[in-house]
Image (cartoon, rainbow, N blue to C red):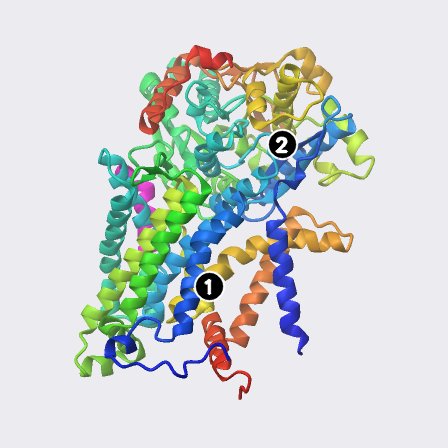
Amino acid sequence: MKLKPLASVALAIAAAAALLGTGPAFAQAKEQFIPVLSYRTGAYAPNGAPWANGFVDYLKLVNARGGLNGVKLTFEECETGYDTARSVECYERLKSKGASFVQPLSTGATFAITEKAPADKIPVVTIGYGRSESADGTVFKWNFPIAGTYWVASDAIVQAIGKKEGGLDKLKGKKIALVYHDSPYGKEPIPLLQERSKQLGFELQLLPVNAPGVEQKATWLQVRQNRPDYVLLWGWGVMNSTALKEAQATGYPREKMYGVWWAGAEPDVKDVGDGAKGYNAVTMQHGAEPQSKLVKDVLAMVYEKGQGTGPKADVGQVLYMRGAMSAMIGIEGIRSAQERFGKGKVMTGEQVRWGLENLNLTQAKLDALGFAGVMRPISTSCVDHMGASWARIHTWDGGKWNFTSDWLQGDEQVIKPMVRSTAAKYASEKKLTPRTPEDCQS
Amino acid sequence: MLYRENGQFKSTYRADQQVFPIRQDRIFVIAVLAFAFLAVPMLASDYLFRAILIPFLIFSLAAVGVNILVGYCGQISLGSGAFMAVGAYGAYNFFVRIPGMPLVPALILGGLCATAFGVLFGLPSLRVRGLYLAVATLAAQFFADWMFLRIKWFTLDTPSGSVAVSNLQVFGLPLESAVSKYLFCLAVLVIIAMLAKNLVRGAIGREWMAIRDMDVAAAVIGIRPMYAKLSAFAVSSFIIGVAGALWAFIYLGAWEPSAFSVDYSFRLLFMVIIGGLGSIMGSFFGAAFIVVLPIALNQFLPVLAGAFGLQISTAGISHAELMIFGALIVWFLIVEPHGLARLWSTAKQKLQLWPFPH
């Protein structure tokens, strides 16, 4: 028994050493460090895990292809559980290892990290999520909501509904309900939908659902009473399948439901199966792409060698592709930085920021990376940190997701002025001076 | 041998009534403060400051507040997360709406908002006790969640409901670097903990303890239950409110109502139970246990597994972290039901008798 305190002291010292040992000892030559904030546990794990698998597999694929002009990618995952405080801890932990960019993977964490990143000189990359006004690069120098935001997603849905009705003008007098996750994430589309409702004359009903969203009886009772013509679903994780089951129970037609891309993947509908048949969701460019060259490469170069992160069957699913595409855009940012600051060198956060701001993903480059048919070209600039605003609608047929619309594009006439005015408000609150054209050159 | 009060004669009441009557205690406290203020800023890394020390200080402060209410006055509360939220949003509104508002008055005003809110939700304590009161204070939590989600005025009509602060400074010094934030939190903690320590050993603290031990008997000897209970709610929620404001302003920078979910109420209650009810020192132990241990486990487990040539997945680590943490809570509660603070005082007693303990 005498040993017991000794053992616990030893444990404590070892734990303290583990804490202290996370210093910048990592900064070896020719290794580019990528932090991975993910959530594989908690209420959102069914959706968080495939995203993380796709992200990590893509990093492994880049290494299998010989790295980034010879620079090997290293990464470390940190479990956040979708908790903002824990995400900040993960950010601080991985930052000290020399992060090239960070993908917070939660709107709450994006807001918190946006305040910290400029001081730390780390670009915040939010592929298709985050704060919509950060598309304005003159105010949000370090934020990159590349390839779409929630405003683009909701605008695309409004356009898709307009097409279905035979023209946007036909939306006048219609009722559209937004069933949303009551968090910054779920509230993001509201300003755009309000703007659109003013413009087009449809009535917008806001129906919040408390996180995590397993209890929605009251919300769907309201849907039953008000009978909206369309329901937009801004859910996440377990909330989506619950909403679909409730819709089934209420008898609300699934064909009239449109989900955001976080609500349009396999884990959301699989449990409901046939009950979700006809349910639509917007995708920011890609859907499930098991036939793409990227998936074949991942299977051949990563999974064949037994290095796959997740189950093989999930490779190519919607959220898996999302993770892979998010990783790809970040990595291409590093590559474009290398083209300016020296090929085969390790890039700093500041250099990666330049690379992301001058990203030019042409069709040829996408084809070479294996993203042919998965997504369209993207090019960013100092003013426009989004680069592209393409979207498509896909529909669940009971077994898989199929595209049911052409390419849609977020309406710049609507989104641009909103981005500019919201960003200007942010700048005035923070007493930031927007960047000058000279600053853009640097 | 070293820790012995022999020969320390008190010749005045003042000397007998000071905060730390034993000389060695005074030296120890001064040494700890000197270490925290002088040595730590030189030794610790940026990560240690931002991810571990600052959360530890802020939660210690909140735990001191909860301990006054739960540990000293015996009123079980599950509304601590709500008091933190009110403090944070109150301070935010004063800070943003009044041009040129300095940080420290904003924090104090945020704490006062929490005081008003705490007294309001403390009113049921005059009628209900124990578990029933816990349920009644839980209402505060739901009310705060609802208030900050739905009443747009509190969040300045931001579309996403998330608010942010920046350009913080104290007396003209910017609070940007990790060290400056750490020192600011530490200063707030030391001042408030000292005040709390003095309160609980004064007349008002004795009233609280009398109410805790038996409120009927306390009323018989002339203690006003209403005054004692509500003052405990007021003081406690002020401290928790300041801690909430610090958590939002200093640690998060940008936050939404879910940053102060019911989870935090439970966590704070666990802190004071594990740390030791009715002990200011225990609040620090409890905060260290709840805040630092999971993060330490999360980082230590992969190292440990690596030593045996194993590799655990991220999800596996996080599951193991929860399991070990839960097991440790149960273990500590079985071995020392009176909390970690009791271990501390036992150690002190043993030291006084050393080398002949009995």
**Is residue B104 positioned above or below A333 on the image?**
below
Residue A222 position within the rendered picture, expressed as x and y whole percent measured from the top left? 36, 40
Q: Where is residue B339 in the image (x, y as percent from the top left)?
A: 47, 72
Q: In this view, does A307 lie above or below B130?
A: above
Q: In this view, does A225 lie to the left or right of B355?
A: left
Look at the image and give the residue range highlighted in magenta: B139-153
* Label 1 CA crowd tier, 10 Å (few <14, some 14–19, many 20+): many
At mark 1, the secondary structure is helix
- Residue A343 left/right relative to A417: right
Q: Residue at x 65, y 58 (%)?
A: A14
A324, A117: nearer the viewer: A117
Q: In this view, does B90 lie above or below A383?
A: below
The residue pinned by badge 2 equals A323
Identify the residue under disc 1.
B286
Tell me how far mark 2 sits from mark 1, CA to CA.
Answer: 38 Å
* Proximity of marks 2 and 1: CB atoms separated by less than 8 Å: no
Secondary structure of residue under mark 2: helix
